[in-house]
Every structure is written in C-alpha cells, then in structure tokens.
Amino acid sequence: MYSALLLSFALPLCLSLAAPSAPSLPLGHPPWLDDHGHNQPYYPNPLNPVPGKLPLNIDEKVNYYEPHHNNDGNGTYKRSPCPAVNLLANRGYIPRDGKQVSYPELAQASRDVYNFGDDNIMLVLVPAFSAHPNATHLDLDQFADAAVQHLINCPAAPTRMDIEIGDNIDLNMTLLESLLSFSKEGVTLSLEDMAEHHHLRHNESKAENPRFRFGNIDAACALAQYANLAAVLGRVGPHGLSTVYVDDVREFYEKEDLPSTYGRRELPYFSVEANDHIDRMAYHVGFQIVRPFPKGDGTGKWKDVEPVVARYEGEGGEGGGAQKLSDTDVLSPE
C-alpha cells in the first residue's frame, strides 16, 4: 500500500521533470565555451531514493588502457598533475597523447566517466583555459605550468610536489605512501583522515617552499583534491556512502586507471557537494575558507589561512594570517 502511494506521487513528478537546458553563459564568454555540454538529469527511484553508483561499461576495444607518463617518447606524450585527467588520456576518452585537448572534449569525458557536474567542470577548466590567452586547446602539462599556479594548481597537493620545490606533475611515491598511512585501520580513509594528511602537507609546504602562500583559493584547491577522491572513488563503508578505500586510492594513483571496484555516480558531482566536503575538512583542521574569495587573497592577512597547529592537535600555534575558529566563528571577506 505504502509503495503504491509513493509511486503514485513520484511518477507524475518524475514525468514532469524535463531534461535541463544547458546553463546560460555570461556575455562575452570565450568561444571555446559555446559547446560546453551539460549533465544528464538524475531521476530517483522512489523505492531507493539515495543515489548510488553503477558499473561503468567500458568498450575495451576502444577505451583500452595504455598508460604513459609526462614527456614519454621524447615528449610525444603529455600528462597533468591530476590522475583523473591522465586516466582519461590513458583510456582514450581524450587524445591519448595528451596534446591539443579541447574544452568540450575534456568536459564531456569528465561527465561520461566520472559524472562530474557542469559547475565543477567549469570551476577547473575555465580558469585553466583563460590563463592561456587565445588558447582553444591545451596540452595536459599546461594544467601545471606557471600560468595556472594559485588558480587550479596549488601548494600542498596530496601526491605532487610544489612547483617551487620540484616536479609538480609526476606522482611522488613518498607522498602517496604518506597519504595511505593516514588510514586508522589500514583499510579505509575518512574525510577527517584526509584532512589530517592535508594538514601535514600544508606544514611541509610551509617549511620547504621559499615562496609559500596559501590563501583561500589555495586551501579550496588543495582540499578539493581529497573531496574529489571521496566523490569519485568513495563507496559504501564504515564512513558512509563516500568511504574511500586504501586499495582503490593506490590503484587510482599508481596506475592512473579506474579501480576494479569503480562505480560511476548516478547523481552528478556538483560544487555544493564538493564544498560541503571541503568545509568539513577545513573545520576539522580548524579554519574556514572565506567565500567569495577576498580581495588580496594570498597576501597580507590572507597569506596563510590555515593554522600550523590543527584543532584536533590542540590549542595555539596559528600561522601568519591564519583564521583559527571556535565552534561559533563565521568569517567574512573584507
């Protein structure tokens, strides 16, 4: 009886939902945004309304796995600091050589494989393309060059060195092992575990990078890399629906391929979910990312928005400009 009533309510609602139109674009937008595409709608099952993950059907004759590293083949292949982007090239969802990749190609591949939300795609790709004036296509290593620093590439990345210190494109195995070691039981990682690893990376970068700065944009960029792990690789487990498993993270980073357990999200991964994860991790460390990003972000009082001693570690020890929070603090841009 209950199921029938629920279906009688939900069916007309689902039928009334039209596929969303493509997001409207700002006046004067660059031409490479014209063909940006958009996510397919998610229609919930009224008997199981929590969106889950479904197996991704891969045509292995077309999207076979062929890994490459940056500058393999005397520069024939280009790769980025992001394993998710490199995976798309390794699997042929974008040009396998990682050269001259267009915005629409990368955006659609991100939807097809990860169901990344349109807004999250734009938050990464628009700054990357805009930082290279008049570029309609980019090589993947341009997602790590000087033009995109403190925009989409930031200090204290989970598994890459800062550009001021060394190689900021290729996987650093020492940093990967450090990340995996933050699992409390050696099997899974929670958002709090990853926040604690991030805080270690922040303090390492602060100590080692002679041009260290860590404004609100940098904090959001660094923490987003962990948030994306939970959203893309997370599955049901002891930390909820987005439990991250150590074995999945290792396979994803080392092979730059989809873990054998991978399931594609039913619900697109929009920025509201990403920022919820980011804010939860920032709170665990003991600071708050200010939005909209304040004028002069990365300078003055905003040069380092994260405390040196985290909330979970005890009182005191803020870094220069850090905004240490009490349970009731709310920060605003000036």
Image (spheres, rainbow, N blue to C red):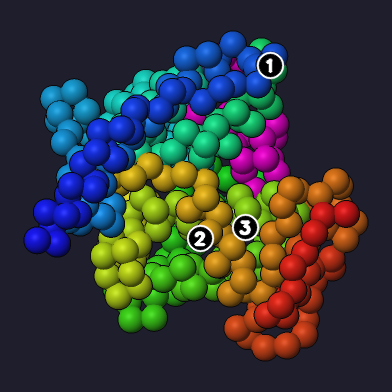
Q: Callout 2 environment at 10 Å: few (<14), some (14 to 19), or many (20+)?
A: many
From the image, tell me which residue sits under label 1: 27
From the image, tell me which residue sits under label 2: 277
The kind of residue tagged 2 is His
Q: Residue at x 23, y 48 (%)?
A: 9
Of residues 16 and 253, which is closer to you in this image? 16
Q: Which residue is drawn at 79% across and 68% down?
A: 322
In the image, is residue 280 above or below residue 216? below
In the image, is residue 21 above or below residue 228? above
Q: Which of marks 3 and 1 is nearer the N terminus?
A: 1
Farthest-out residue, left: 1
In the image, is residue 1 above or below residue 256? below
Q: Nearer the viewer, mark 2 or mark 3?
A: 2
The tally of labels here is 3
> Picture quarter containing residue 257?
top left
Span shown in magenta? 135-156
The kind of residue tagged 3 is Ala
Of residues 20 and 239, which is closer to you in this image? 20
**Horizontal side, residue 98 vs residue 132: left or right:** left
Q: In the structure shown, which secondary structural element does the residue marked by tag 1 occupy?
A: loop
Q: Is residue 138 magenta?
A: yes
The kind of residue tagged 1 is Leu
From the image, tell me which residue sits under label 3: 156
**Horizontal side, residue 267 vs residue 220: left or right:** left
- Residue 268 visible in this rendered orientation of the protein: yes
